[in-house]
Amino acid sequence: MADLLGTFEQSVLLSILNLGEGAYGRAILNGVQESLQRRISAGAVYSTLERLEASGLVRSRLEAGTAVRGGRARRYYNVPAGGRRALSETRRALTAIWGNVELRAEARP
Amino acid sequence: MESLLERMLAAQKREEIVGDFREEYIESILPQRGQLRADLWYARHALSFLPRAMRDSRTMGKLLIFISGFTMICMFWLAAMEMKLRHPGFGSRMALDICIALLCLVTAVSRILPSPQNPKETWVRGMWFLVMLFGAMTFYNNARAPHFEGFVFVISLLLIAQGMLTVLTLDGRKSLGQRTK
């Protein structure tokens, strides 16, 4: 079985899936911050995207930029079958690990 | 600010990341936060690329290999001096010097071999973190000692510098390609 994806990697992949056709760097960063409910550094997100792409879990393509970007190209990302499979396996494994465990708040003395 | 960010990025990634930052800065951050806070936002995120820039930098890599070689020679010299002088407790000090020398050799090799073939950088960074602490303790003890040793001062600083450089430039994370089957 492949190793599980980390929380951050899952968040990045799910952000790409949620964004669909609009999944580019800036939008992915904002999506990850929203899902993790904390400030995330851009370096962490772009490094993760690079790593995921090197492993084939993410694909990217360059498209023409806009005037506000100074004409610089945008890189859009998508999750191919391998990435979706990795997410599914991670989810299945986490579900199996948690099983029927319920976490209750500790009773106060 | 853009030139700061551009310096942190590899050439092939520069265009789209700088474009993303400019877009976010102009459309979202500047209108919400004002000039000063927007610039701080930009600087914070630009500097977040620094660790990666250092790991990927060829200059830093060469510097790490050079310093590792120099530290290794210093440690073997110290071990030789311990063996010659044979002060009480020289055996353990000699063993420690040789271990640090071998760690320098492993560090240089870690940097020379490409990452996927060399998955042990995590423990090399860990060991150097310990050596860095040891160097800091030695520096402190020598500074407070009644008889200040110049070579101890130099070598302890070298160990601290080597430790910091190693921790920053070696990639402690294995690539996903090594983990995912």
Image (spheres, rainbow, N blue to C red):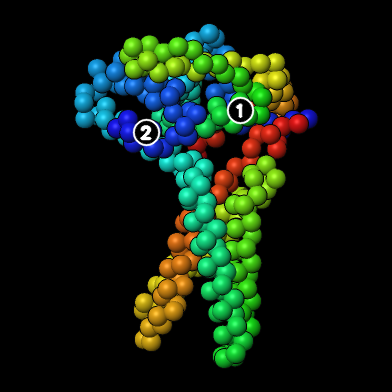
Q: Secondary structure at mark 2?
A: helix
Q: Is residue A60 left or right of residue B27?
A: right
Q: Is residue B120 left or right of residue B181?
A: left
Q: Position of residue A52 (x, y in %)?
A: 61, 27
Q: Quadrant of residue B97?
A: bottom right
Q: Position of residue B166 (x, y in %)?
A: 52, 55
Residue designated by label 2: B5
Question: Depth check: B103 or B90 in front?
Answer: B103
Question: Depth check: A54 or B163 in front?
Answer: A54
Question: Depth check: B122 or B79 in front?
Answer: B79
Which label belongs to residue A52?
1
Indicate the quadrant containing the N terminus of chain B: top left, top right, bottom left or bottom right: top left
Q: Is residue B145 above or below residue B37?
A: below
Would you call the spot at circle 2 few (<14 residues within 10 Å), some (14-19), or many (20 or more)? Answer: many
State which chain disc 2 sits on: B
Indicate the quadrant containing the C terminus of chain B: top left, top right, bottom left or bottom right: top right
Q: Position of residue B16 (x, y in %)?
A: 44, 22
Q: Are marks 2 and 1 on the same chain?
A: no
Determine the residue positioned at 41% across, 75% down.
B153
Q: Position of residue B96 (x, y in %)?
A: 60, 74
What's the CA distance linking mark 2 and mark 1? 22 Å
Residue that extends furthest to the top in the rendered view of this protein: A21
Q: Amino acid at mark 2?
A: Leu
Which label belongs to residue A34?
none
Residue that extends furthest to the right in the rendered view of this protein: A1
Of discs 2 and 1, which sits in the foreground? 2
